[in-house]
Image (cartoon, helix red, strand yellow):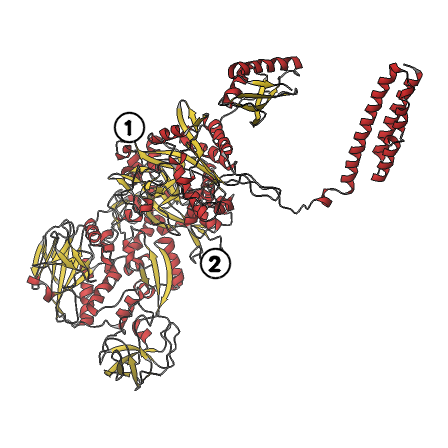
Amino acid sequence: MNISFNWIDELARLRGELRDPRALAERLTMTAAAVEKIETVGAGLDGIVVSRVLETRPHPNADRLTLCRVDRGAGEVLDVVCGAPVVVPGAFYPHVAPGGELPAGFRIESRKIRGELSHGMLCSEAELELGRDKGGIMRLADGLEPGTPLAAALGLPDTRLTLDLNPNRVDLACHMGVAREVGGPPSPRDFRGPAWSPEWRDGESEVSGAGVTVRIEDLGRCPRYMAAVIRGVRVGPSPPWLAGRLLAVGARPISNVVDATNYVLHECNQPLHAFDLARLSGAEIRVRPAAAGEPLMTLDGQEHKLSPDQTVIADRDRAIAFAGVMGGLDTEVTGDTVDLLIECASFDPAGVRRTRTGAGLSTDASYRFERGIDIHAQERALARCVELILATAGGEADLIGLRAGPAPVPAAPIDVRVSRVNQVLGFGLDGAAVLAALEPIGFEALPGADGGDGAGGAADRLRVSVPGWRTDVAREIDLVEEVARRVGYDAATGQDRRFRPSAVPADPRVEKAVRVRDLLTGRGLLEARSLSFMPEDYRGNRAVVSVPNPLSAEESCLRSAMVPVLLRRLEHNYARGNRNVRLFELGTVFGYAAGPGREEEADGTGRFEESGRVGAVVAGARRPDHWSGPGLDFDLWDLKEIAGSFADRLCGATLEPLDGAGAAEAAGSGASLAGPWLSRGGFRAVKDGRTVGVAGAVDLASVDAPPWAAPAFALEFDLASVEGRPVPAYRKTSPFPAVRRDLSMTVPRGVPAADIERAAREATSDLLRDVRLFDVYSGEEIEGGRLGLAWTFRFRAPDRTLTDREVESEMSALSNALEERFGARIRRS
Amino acid sequence: MTPAGASLLDRLAAIEGEGLAAIGEAADSAALESARVEYLGRNGRLADVMSLIGTVEARARRDVGQRANAVKTVLRGALEARAKALESATRGPSARIDLTLPARGRWVGGVHPVTRVIDEICEIFAELGFTSVLGPEIESTWYNFTALNIPLDHPAADMMDTFYLDKDVVLRTHTSPVQARVMETFRPPVRVVVPGLAYRRDSFDPSHAPAFEQIEGLAVDEGVDFVEFRAAIEHFVHHFFGRGTKSRFRPSFYPFTEPSAEVDVSCAVCAGGGCSTCKRTGWITIMGSGMVDPAVFKAVGYDPERYTGYAFGMGPARIAMVRHGIPDMRLLYEGEMSFLQQFT
């Protein structure tokens, strides 16, 4: 929202430090609405004057150029070549003389243009940096004195403040609203009053007078429609002071009539519309729902096909405007317009929203109607507009004004308790201080509910009226906010940073996430974060929950698993030439509930299911390259360590081998952890008979991998299976030495090493503390069909040094068990 | 044992003792070499004794021979050890190895910069008694809007363009619905922070993402007022951004808080002078906040006359961007190794 400093100054008569636009901006930011930008409008206009084109003739050598005789005052008449499509003899335009400069710093000299000498130039708004209009030169109102400096005529330079309005403060979208916040009069009646004071003719939903009829067909959509009629206007450029105001707020001056409606909009927030009365068939205004398929061409030249949930202004025969949004092209005010009907209405916010979203439009008018206008100040707004038109376009206003719709009811007063203000704010204010905060912005003290005197005496409960423009204020707490803001949020300077215990226990998932991050970062993995969206069926992200209104096909679904997301990140790294990738991510995956889902939810969320997952992917070098020798790449056994530690340390789960068929089966089950990437099998973590995690080599054919890519490995675990941090019980450490025995053996191929280890533990006592496989070999010295395995066993007693005899007896029990159960052949050395 | 055998054993003991001493005292390799020649050389003292073994009577010959071999082994070992010691003492490893060669590296893992921000925020508020809780990302329109005093057709809904999964089911547009869920379940005192993902239909650009982290805070009890709220937020600002950081509260609007405030902190990049990070204002907005609206208390069954409280929401991704000088939000979500490695 753009605000003119000069305009505010005129309305509020700024005093003291607020006369500095920066100080004004600071005040507004801290008490009302943030000022995003401060800029000067109309700087650099020195030397540019109002000039009058005396006569024109075509340029002899160029079709598009015009030769003008220009009077720039003080008897100075110059020849100027002009390229604008229209130059009206006798009209007034800005002129920059030879030797002068445009605001952008471009120096103008006398020069020949296609053989004709041109002394300076006539300027467009864009050239003067007053607007974006490059279409033609800037026509000024007739009757100015040639030679008047342009800036002075336009009331420039000015400072434009761009406000970032909070959605509840539409009242600050106009200059009266902003002026009020910084010391201007609290009420519209105290701002300069208009002269036009008609005899009002009222009707419940229909009213006639001044030669026209107004009918509201649906008071729900349009509670009030007021109209004034002006006859005999002369449409032309606005006087420069008015045009300057509009330029200062970034609006484009169009004509005196249209500019008057815009001026009132920016002054007091009331959207107005001027119709060319002669174009209204039947001299009628009807506010009605649009007929299905009815056509309307708006001011911007767009064709619309209407639907019945949109509201239109119509004449006897057709729709002529979108109610509260934009006028129609057919009835707009043009240079030929003589008689006007000025609309000053109030439309239902939701209806305006429907009308404008259906039309794909958003306008200054719809913005205000959607948020609420001051229905009590409409008479003043209409009168102000009529007065401005009479002053700038002439004509005669009909003495009858029309008002259709019931008279607005004043907003109910609000009781505010001083004790409540202090309970919420802690500012320690008394009643007088509360009123002193509220009254300057239009809330008036009324005789109070506690029998207070309306002056904020001893009574706790104060009663205040709510001004019509504060459609956002309806409750006591709304007034508490007004007080806080007016006293200043900075008044809260307490140092009470008290600790208060919370009755809400911490969610255990937070600690589980920490455990997961600790384990994986400790293994050199980096945490990634991705958007939760995936393309349909991407790398095994099955199209489970699709988003009905996605931003793009790339983001059409919610992820159903983490590994596909990470494979996408892997591909991104491949695309950047990164061979070494170690990523993990914690996140939510989504699906449809298999059963009743979140049963406790009576609402529609029960159809869906979401759960926490962690995924990881590793590929490339196990350690950074080093000059001492070639490094090794991550392999299956590195993955097994990560997945195994995850399963064992975090979940209390057991890691089991999973072959390709098992993986396919696992992938097929609902909300599964596995996906097509696991087609070559790997591992699964099992807890209480349930698969809580999977891990395996990524089938590189299933991703977009370059030829130099190293084998990639991935895992995915269900976060719900992660347990809280365990508290291990102390076990006495032994001060006595351990005895190590190495054992080399051959076993038939196919005997799982894990079974041998388990059997070894079963065959021995708890003196066996550690079992380690340190070599696996096959080759010539091993007979066919067998495999060599070399193990280290460590024995240790907590209370004594073991004797050879004890260890030998354990070892022979162990050897016998392995020979019997697996046909192991122990190599004796 | 015969006198001859016993005397040889004595001589061997002397050779061992004296030889070890000589070797131990050798100050350089030349001294060591002369000790070697003296004791272990072809004509050295040990060789002398060994040449006499044949003279010993057969019974004792084996003992003497074994002993002689043992002495030889001991002296050789000592000689070798001394040689090594001398070598390292005189030359040292630096003389032999270029210590400027690169170390053997290892991969260093780490959490995402946004995770770090979230964790730090939770820790700072934990000091004030806040516990961390979580909530669902798929949310009903009741919790996401209605319970938070947001009518579904209100223009405020424009601020958060929503992903609808179903007529009354959305991807939550903020973490605020967890406020309502927590208050429905627990009675005051309530003090929670809620980290999590939120979703809005913003296109993915340098300063927006359609899915983004948010962290919500809520404190409700008797006697919690705006003054305490401000003090708590200042505590956070000082601990997170540093003691010299100024903060300011300015009016804002949220349907579920009143009064509402946006909190700005002084720009650390330019110290208030104005730079591109703070869009030349000297201030960076870090949170939306306010006193909980009584309508929210009513919706969850709290007595708004008895309880008051404050709530706030922050965007950890934006804060991470400010903290690390990351110019484009999309970098946070690409998962590129060289990016993530910088924050470990």
Q: Secondary structure at mark 1?
A: loop
Of discs 2 and 1, which sits in the foreground?
Answer: 1
* Quarter of image, res B31: top right
Mark carried by residue B273: 2
Q: Position of residue A482 (x, y in %)?
A: 32, 49
Residues behind callouts 2 and 1 on a single chain: no
Viewer-nearest residue: A361 or A175:
A361
Q: Which residue is mark 1?
A: A595
> Up-down: is A696 above or below B268?
above
Q: Amino acid at mark 1?
A: Gly
State the residue at coordinates (40%, 43%): A568
* Quarter of image, res A103: bottom left
Chain letter of disc 1 in the image? A
> Up-down: is B32 above or below A227?
above
Instruction: Check disc 1: other Cα within 10 Å, few if <14, some if 14-19, many if 20+.
Output: few
Mark carried by residue A415: none
Q: Secondary structure at mark 2?
A: loop
Q: Position of residue B199 (x, y in %)?
A: 34, 43
Q: Position of residue A703 (x, y in %)?
A: 40, 41
Viewer-nearest residue: A213 or B32:
B32
